[in-house]
Amino acid sequence: MALLRHPSRCWLRDWRKYALSSSPNSTSKSSTNFLPEDVVDSSSLTYSITLPNQLADPVTVDAAPGISASEFRRVHFSVRKAIDSSLFKQWLKNMQSEAGVLSNGAMSLERVLIQGVDMFGNRIGFLKFKADILDKETGKKVPGIVFARGPAVAVLILLDSEGEIYTVLTEQARVPVGKRILELPAGMLENDRGDFIGTAAREVEEETGIHLNLQDMVDLTAFLDPSTGCRLFPSPGGCDEEISLFLYKGSVSKETITQLQGKKTGLRERGELIKVHVVPYEKLWRVTADAKTLSAIALYEMAKKEGLLPPAG
């Protein structure tokens, strides 16, 4: 079922169906027969997929060499599980979309090498793979290392307190960049239902303690041209992450602002050690290097300038 994202602009279409079959040359092995020091034979983890616009050229999907049997068991890893994941299906959908890499036939997908999987419970949370994309005119491969983490949401919260506008940020330790970062409340979609607004509201409540009314939230990325997909791509050179940015405006007392400042929140059982910061909106663009925050400011200011925001309730 399609998900409407803006009255006249962006929507998500149903996923295409892909033909999936085991490679006829592959040999099936059970991981329960491996000793901990054994290494999985990569030929036992080879599949092929057939794309609608490459019917004559099936795509090989296999595992990186040297995967140990113990690791295979520990993370419940299999190429088939990666292929069946929503992350991989969405990537294939993007590749064949109207603006996709494979849309005009100038490039072809030759092979996908699964290099790593991180499980979030029973589902794949992160997927890393290398895609061999061939430019037919030059015969050269296009850089194709992918870190797939899927869609996410973030919320720009503007609180009016006695005529002054404040923004709510979270401070977290971000290990990949080695720093503590001030950023918008944000989170990943945890299922395939596409509940962007609900996820955004839930993440805000978990990270700041603020309860948002869903009907008061505005999707800022929906104002982008439909050709963009109405999502923000913060790092398209290596990551598939696409973010929906929402706006929430409310009025609070000075006492509430004081209570929020420095508040410690987050789901401790998930390792979320979050500290809330309340910043005057006029200073927001200078206090953080978070791409989500700076993009939200730009979208909000342009939407306000062009009269696209709904009237204040």
Image (cartoon, helix red, strand yellow):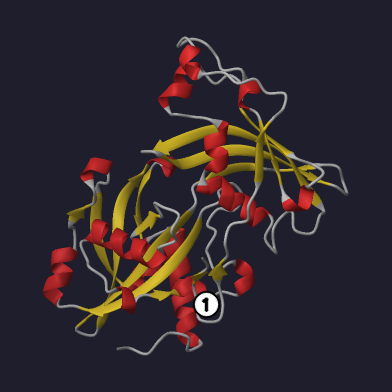
**Nearer to us in this view, 36 or 14:** 14
Residue 45 found in image quarter: top right
Amino acid, disc 1 = Phe
Q: Is residue 181 left or right of residue 151?
A: left
Image x and y of residue 230, in percent: 55, 69
**Above or below, comparing residue 52 to residue 224 in the picture:** above
Q: Is residue 284 left or right of residue 35?
A: left
**Above or below, comparing residue 53 to residue 246 in the picture:** above
Residue 193 found in image quarter: bottom left
Residue beneath disc 1: 223
Residue 171 found in image quarter: bottom left
Q: Residue at x 52, y 77 (%)?
A: 223
Taking the image as drawn, is residue 274 in sight? yes
Q: Residue at x 45, y 11 (%)?
A: 36
Residue count near mark 1 (Cα–Cα under 10 Å), binned few <14, some 14–19, many ≥20: many
Q: Residue at x 69, y 56 (%)?
A: 96
Image x and y of residue 144, in percent: 67, 43
Q: Is residue 83 left or right of residue 216?
A: right
Q: Secondary structure at mark 1?
A: helix
